Image (spheres, rainbow, N blue to C red):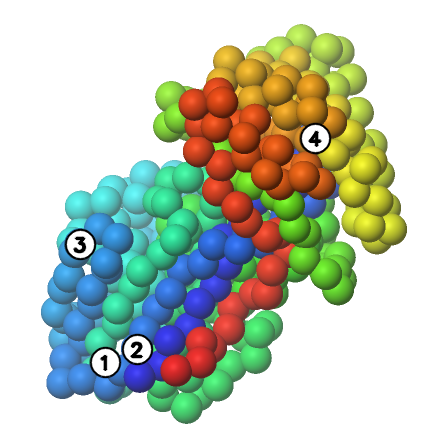
Amino acid sequence: MVTCSAPGKTHLIGEHSVVYGEPAIIISVGKRAYVSAEKAESVKIYAHDINESGVFSISELKEFAETLQQLWANCFETKNFVPLYSLLKNEHLGHIKAMIAKTMAELDINAPFSLKISSELPIGSGLGSSAALSVAVPKALSELFKNTLTLDEINQVAYKIESLAHGTPSGGDNSICCYGGALWFKKGTPNIIEPLHLDFTLKNFVLVFTRIPQLTTGELVSNVRSLDPEYRDLRVNQLGMYTYEMRECLAKQDFTRMKELMNLAQELLAELGVSIDAIDRIHTAVKEINGGAKLSGAGGGGYMVCYHEDLQLLEQTIKKLGYVPEQVELGVEGVRTERK
């Protein structure tokens, strides 16, 4: 048996402003998705977190991979991926089946196997649960069949898998889950995705789940876009400046300025209308104890990322507000094979 894992991800800074061409820093999170693979008589899948399983033939999965590829091409041409999303939604183990079928096609796997999948990353949390699996699945299957891939090759397969779930993804999420550490991301043609070469992990961080977002990422982005352009662009540009400064802070390991930039970014995001009362309360309380706290991702709820040199004080402050702090390291190792 081979077991591989990949980390989740979060935005340290730059969400929303990245839509307007400003940079963002995406960083790996010390919560991981795990995939265990072994040879078997048929293709068996067990997804522990959703308590779902399935048994498939090689031919069925090959046909599914061909169907997905053709449908993706059609959707790309029409600029409408709804038919692809609908197929995956209505298919048993849709996204997981798609990951496996696409990996088999890319790696030319013609032998059966079983996969057990589990994750510390909540589905739909904004922490990159699907991106982590899109990296861990090809890593595990390549190891099982002795077709060991480089990180770049794994990332290429992962991007193709992510395309089935997101149409035309940026590539940032699968890249950070593959390589780990921190990435500098800037939207463009092509997108700029560069490692920041951290030689340390960021400690004394906690994640805090506030609530399930009531708006989708697309709706939140649209709401920001509908703001008065002068009002919006002033804040977007400022977020971009803070992101450039954050890169320098990480290089210098200046954690004092880092937490100040986290707070400044959160206040701008609140002014853009993507915060909620719970996030604002936690941010205010953490700032009052001289820590840093901001939403992570699109906002409207979801997770926050919080930092303080005194981890115990940080946790106590958050618990007093009725929320559960989850200790994590940031900038952790990317996809890897776990020791037996």
In terms of sequence position, does the residue under pointer 3 or pointer 2 come before the other? 2
Under mark 2, the amino acid is Ala
Location of the N terminus by quadrant is: bottom left
Q: Mark 1 points at which residue?
A: 113
The crowd level at tag 2 (other Cα within 10 Å; few <14, some 14-19, many 20+) is many
Q: Quick check: marks 2 and 1 in contact, CB under 8 Å?
A: yes
Q: Label 4: which residue?
A: 291
Q: Is residue 109 above or below residue 281?
A: below
Dot 4 amino acid type: Gly
Q: Give, as a three-letter code, the residue at label 1.
A: Phe
Which element is circle 4 on? loop
Marks 2 and 1 sit apart, C-alpha to C-alpha, by: 7 Å
Whichever of labels 2 and 1 marks the residue nearer the N terminus, that label is 2
Which residue corresponds to the image point at 59% horizontal and 72% vertical from the top-left?
Answer: 152
Spatial CA distance of label 3 from label 2 is 17 Å
| Residue 16 or residue 276, whichever sits in front | 276
First in residue order: circle 2 vs circle 4: 2
